[in-house]
Image (cartoon, rainbow, N blue to C red):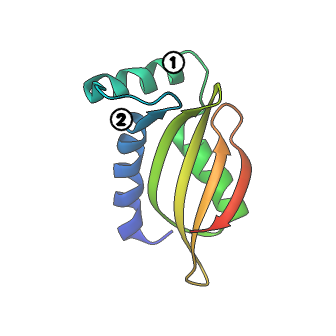
Amino acid sequence: MHPAYLCTVAFLTLAAAGTLADEAPRHHHDHDHDHDRARAALAGGEVRPIDEILASAAEAVPGDPIKVELEHEQGRWIYELKVIAEDGRRLEVLLDAATATVIEVEQD
């Protein structure tokens, strides 16, 4: 992985812990608690560590991650990664956060 992207990955690791979207619509959401929910999910074994998620995504789609989100959808945690593939395409990779299994890869 290119050294410039290591800083990006480190930033994305922190960002993933604080970027959550719940399946229920919210009008008054307190974003200050999103990182707490992400940390609790990791501590409780509900989600895999970000390094495992990135490794699993890299096996499926070699390239450079540019964005990571952790969302709670339909009763489960999902990591959504935006990746610039080696061929230059921008792809979205969805992974089951509990297993690090790739669910879907699609053009973004």
Q: Secondary structure at mark 1?
A: helix
Give the mark, 1 or 2, whose residue is nearer the N terminus: 2
Label 1 amino acid? Ala
Picture disc at residue 43:
1
Q: Is residue 90 above or below residue 44?
A: below
Q: Position of residue 81 (x, y in %)?
A: 54, 55
Q: Secondary structure at mark 2?
A: helix
Q: Residues within 10 Å of mark 1 (few under 14, many from 20)?
A: few
Residue occupying the point 72% across, 50% down? 102
Q: Position of residue 7 (x, y in %)?
A: 34, 58
Picture disc at residue 18:
2
Q: Is residue 107 above or below residue 86?
A: above
Label 2 amino acid? Gly
Q: Residues within 10 Å of mark 2 (few under 14, many from 20)?
A: many
Closer to us: 38 or 21: 21
Residue 91 placement, left or right of 2: right
Closer to us: 75 or 91: 75
Q: Is residue 49 above or below residue 82?
A: above
Closer to us: 47 or 31: 31
How far apart marks 1 and 2 lie (CA) works out to 14 Å
